[in-house]
Amino acid sequence: MTDTLIEKQYFPRTLSFYRPHSSTGHQPCEIEINSGMTVLVGPNGSGKTQALRAIKSTLQGDENLRATGKVVRYLSSGRTSPFETYRASISSPQYINTSPASVGQQDHLNKWSEIESATGDLLVLENRADLRLKLEARLQTLYNRSLQLVWGQSGLRLEFRSLQDGATYYANAEASGLLHLISILASLYNDRVSALIIDEPEISLHPQLQAFFLQEAERCAGDPIADPAKKLVVIATHSTNILPVRGVSDLPKLVFFSDRETPPSKLSKNANELQSRRLAGLVSRMSESHKTAFFAQCVLLVEGPSDEIIVSGLAAALEHSLLGGNTQVVPVTGKGAFPDAMKLFKLASKRVVVLGDLDSIIDENSLVAAFAQTAQGLKVANEMGATSLIDLDRALRTELASMSTSSWSDIATLAAQNSYWINRDNLQPEEIATRRAVCGTLLTSSASEIIQISNGSKWLSLKTRLEALLDALEKAGCFVLRRGAIEAYYASMQNDGVKKPEAAAREIEGWQDSAAKLDLESRYADLIRAMRFAAPLPKIDENYLLREKLGAILGSVFQSMRVDMSDTELNSRASAILGPDADIFKLMNISRENQKRLKVDIASSLFRRSTFPFEISEKDNLTAIIMEKLPSV
């Protein structure tokens, strides 16, 4: 050690740093660290890499870590790039350097920690037999490989030998995953590193090897001051296999990133929410889709796998990419799990949208209560003249229970046709089936049908209030299947004896047909509203850019063309006006006497349009015709 340690332990520690921000230039951030491992999660472009670099600078300036006499090591996501010129045509076409892959210089032996690639680790391995043997023990177990490092004229040469047949070969021919693993493990096991920062350690590693990395990282991670054999490990990842979350106490290890504008968030180790037994149970049972949702900006919770299949099918058929909109669909096990799942993802700073069966709000008010507490829920309620959504729900729920009991005979004939009544569970109290059937009937029957039954005006008033509550909940992010359950939306009801997920899979067959899409928009309107609310992405409109380019070409060409101008000259002039973009279109001169006229086609195979080719003259309305041929999506 070079100095006297200032403190006897490193945790808890608050890391303060700045990261780039579009409007302010730099955004101040703070991350509380209470354990040896910290994981940054979030979508691409949310600022994780910039945060890692800022954390590196902060840790390098930490006097407690500096007092250990050890270094802060940073491994970039491009850590194996020094080898790539020997493995692929990187900078020249059809040229791969076939000489033995060599990296590094002897002049850099004392600066290995400043090299953010595998080169730094190889420089250390060549100098330290102990570290090399520790790494080689893993390579022999996992891959039946041994390695050797030899200095040559071009640098340090990495050689491998197969323990199966004794064959020796260079890094040129080795698996990229193995090269990544060597670099990562060498830094993990290096006892001269007090803090290790890795950007995307999962690159090129198969899932089982990612899990192995996590196991080794957790084993090496700890308080570098209290236990000199341990080190801080900070990583940014997009892999669920590298999330160290097995219980609710692990959640504070995660730092959640949403976008460049929003500061990252992290759950405090002492947060009251971590004491919830129900939340602890949910975390311990987390599925792969739950973990994947930690990387999204928005989570769409649905009630079971059938709903997930249908929502995913709708997104594909209607070309509304939920994943492209940074939204993850997560199925929960029953309506009772919605509030806990909401709490979990709210803690992870995710925007949460719920799509539940109608009975999820009819049977109890826990879901309404969960949304009533949100800022948007309060705003919506206030706009309706109520203190909260709970007040609206309570008054409606009271009258609904009363009329379902006292005036059941009024609506019984209509309600008997509702799926809730037809499929009622005779082991449950009848008032549950009655209340569900009444609500389902009110929502699926027209006003003209309702007004004709006994006490029609009262029932119609109840229908209006129920729809108003559901509309308000939707504005807050809570959507319900107004027909009841997902099966009530299927085109075919002939699914007796078929398991629900299989029936859902059958339902989505043939949805890619254009005729089917028109039907889906109306039949699945409740689900589509939820999808578009969760992922409010406009459709990709290629025609917008094509119109802009074509308008510029035609407007200019008509100004300078002659009736006898050749097609070659026409297209050359277009290229002079628009540059390479003009090559997307092909112009043909079909002028008649004194009238300039063009035939326009699309030359690129990437933009096939049924409206092309078309003819246009200088007297035509260019704007109107271009819009007709290239309409907005």
Image (cartoon, rainbow, N blue to C red):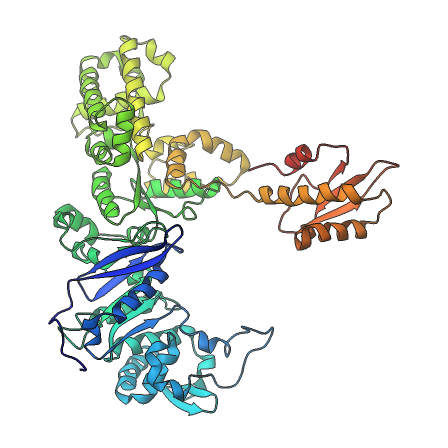
**Which of 231 and 100 lies nearest the eye of the viewer?**
231
**At x 20% / y 43%, what residue is drawn?**
340
Compared to 465, does 333 lie above or below?
A: below
- For the question of whether residue 417 can be seen, the reply is no
Q: Position of residue 444 (x, y in %)?
A: 35, 22
Q: Quadrant of residue 381?
A: top left
- For the question of whether residue 575 can be seen, the reply is yes
- Image quadrant containing the N terminus: bottom left
Q: Position of residue 554 (x, y in %)?
A: 72, 42
**Which of 454 and 326 lies nearest the eye of the viewer?**
326
**At x 33% / y 38%, what residue is drawn?**
497
Looking at the image, which residue sits at the far front? 24
Q: Quadrant of residue 456?
A: top left
**Which of 166 and 194 lies nearest the eye of the viewer?**
194
Q: Position of residue 113 (x, y in %)?
A: 32, 78
Q: Quadrant of residue 601?
A: top right
